[in-house]
Amino acid sequence: MRFADSNARRLFSALLILLGAFVALYLITSRREAAVSPLLDSLPEPLSAECELCKKPLAAGKEVVVQTEERHHLYRCVHCALNAMMKMREAQANLLSGLERKTLIITKKRGNLRVEPSSAVFLILPEAAGDCLDRHLAFAEEAEFSRYLENHPELKALSPKRFTIADLEEMLPAGRPPGSR
């Protein structure tokens, strides 16, 4: 009988250890998923937790990842990313749309900007209290832009213009703020 009790204890101990390992693995992965944007999951090198242009902290899920031939760059918002891309020869920006979290891709080749989907529009308003996250966004389509403004009446009250990539490509190199045509 002692032999059976001894084996039962070993089996019970092994099951407890295995259960502990699964719980630890779950806690580690769930924390990682909550803290890291899906855009950052595939990046090979460790990156800064602040925007390369404005030096403000990145917000998980809202950052813009710009890839050049040399490396990856991280920006807090689409406005910072586009300003930086204007100085780059060729680059590709990956970001999530402001409301539906759809993937958008902005490419710069031979000096020209292009966005996929081509229906994408941008919200670029002056920062409020030094924050840009709810004011510098990209949307997969005009309908998403309109729904965002319906959900944010304080921004809708400012009568913001929706910008296309062509609008921004024209204004950013000239240093003009959006809307000051």
Image: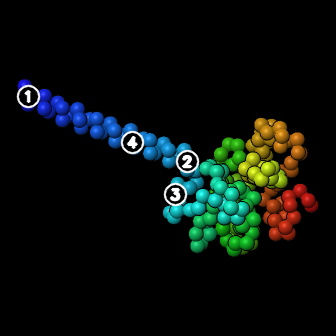
169 or 135, nearer to the observer: 135
23 w.r.t. 131: above or below: above
Figure check: 20 above or below 124: above
Give the amino acid type for the residue marked by disc 3 in the picture.
Ser
Q: Which mark is residue 127?
A: none
Q: Is residue 181 visible?
A: yes
Residue 35 bears which disc, if any? 2
Q: Residue furthest front?
A: 129
Q: Residues within 10 Å of mark 3 (few under 14, many from 20)?
A: few
Horizontal and vertical percent position of residue 45: 51, 64
Residue under pointer 1:
2
Question: Tag 4: residue type?
Answer: Ala
Q: Earlier in the sequence, mark 4 or mark 1?
A: 1
- Provide residue 141's location: percent of width, then percent of height: 75, 47
**Is 127 displayed left or right of 42 in the figure?**
right
Q: Earlier in the sequence, mark 3 or mark 1?
A: 1
The tag on residue 42 is 3
The span from disc 3 to disc 4 (Cα, nearest Å) is 23 Å
Indicate whether 21 appears above or below 44: above
- Discs 1/2, front: 1
Indicate the quadrant where residue 54 lies.
Answer: bottom right
- At label 4, counting other C-alpha atoms closer than 10 Å, the crowd grade (few under 14, some 14-19, many 20 or more) is few
Residue 24, label in figure:
4
Q: Quadrant of the C terminus?
A: bottom right
Q: Tell me the CA gap for discs 3 and 1.
A: 53 Å
Q: Residues within 10 Å of mark 2 (few under 14, many from 20)?
A: few
